[in-house]
Amino acid sequence: MTSQAKPLRIEQLERACLELLARLVHQSWSDDLLTELRAGLCLTRRTTWLRHLANVAWEIRDVEPARAAEIAQMTLDLHDQHIAKQLEQNDLFLFWDDWHHREWFRSLGAALAMSCEELDLPSWASTQCRELPLSVWDAEENYKAFSTADRAVQHWFLVALHAIPVLKELDRAIDPAQVRTLAEVLWGHCHFSEQYIPIHTEALIVEELAARYAAEFGDPSGAWLLDQARDSGVGPCALWALIDQRKLKSTREGETDTHYGEMIISELIRIASDRFGDGGQFDLVALRFWGQLWLLLDAIDEAEQTAIAISAFPLGQRDRTDKILVLKLLTLVDSKRKLSPELGDYVGEIYSQLWSIYTPDQERGDRQQIDELRKQSKVESS
């Protein structure tokens, strides 16, 4: 699903209003002012209006740090009340494709970072989740409440994760061990809840973000990465995002591959491959992430197995992006070793289905990548 972008006119209007509010708070502060501001903001039917309070706190953080912390804490207290009400009504949902929700979490993360000087993120997230009905008994006796509580976990961990880059922007120390622990605790919960609840988009969003922040801010060692690969509770989405972000960071920082790094990747492929097997035990969602992982790692045998496993699903369950992924996987294999005649014909068939007449703009990069691999396979075979 394509995420809805924030309209430029809304961005400009909110920026102008925020600057006026920040000036007013700085120059004419009173409890009545904040009460009136809250009363006006909550008139909207959207539940995300608290982001504006957090944004006011952020705007005045340099000139009024104590006031900013006060408003940030007030924002979090009001948010606690809001979430408690939604939990009572079993009515807590995340709409990540809506920019209001994405901005909401960014603002809540900023409020959390500003609210106190000493912030233990894993402890904070665990405290927020401690009273939730998340036992095995809850899953069996009150599935709806358990499902809502599971979404609340995703919610609170999203807030904690969004505080991490804000702490960096504020030049506050970020404990890498805390970032890794936050990710590990989340993945452990997701592994538990997926025994009772089908995997859903919200969980994947948080799993991926936790992995990317663990790679970006958690200073993960090679041994830690291999431990995650061995852990069956760390799903293919998290594993792919960990390796993808690690590569992105290395490229950005100009790091070159070392013998140690190559050894880590080789061992990572071996461990992940053992977990993957022939891929037959995974659903389509998981296979998509496994496929992306093999592309990152140039894991040829596993790429072929994944393409075959995805293609075995009924046509009604697969979409256009699945065809593109299968094409990428098989052309990668063909660029390293010759495909069987049947799979070679299948590659040509999929390619024609996708792009014989027209290539959508958003797929031009995919087609270029596949074309380069196909050229490489022809060179190798000539």
Image (cartoon, rainbow, N blue to C red):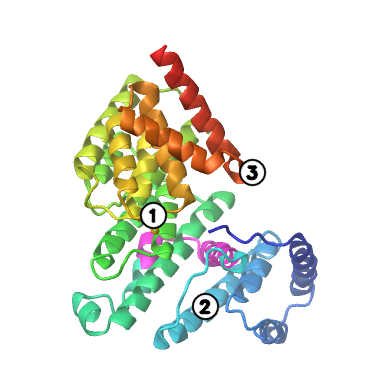
Q: Are marks 2 and 3 in contact (CB under 8 Å)?
A: no
Q: CA distance from mark 2 to mark 3?
A: 41 Å
Q: Amino acid at mark 1?
A: Leu
Callout 2 secondary element: helix
From the top left corner, tell me how far across and down residue 318 is, in percent.
40, 54
- Residue depicted at 74% across the width and 62% down the height: 11
In this view of the protein, which residue sits in the foreground, 358 or 11? 358
Q: Is residue 253 visible?
A: no
Residue segment shown in magenta: 102-125
Q: Is residue 373 magenta?
A: no
Residue 79 marker: 2
Identify the residue under disc 3. 361
Pointer 1: what residue?
A: 315
Q: Which quarter of the rendered picture does the C terminus lie within?
A: top left
Distance between mark 2 and mark 1 Cα atoms: 44 Å
Tell me residue 303's x, y (percent). Answer: 33, 36
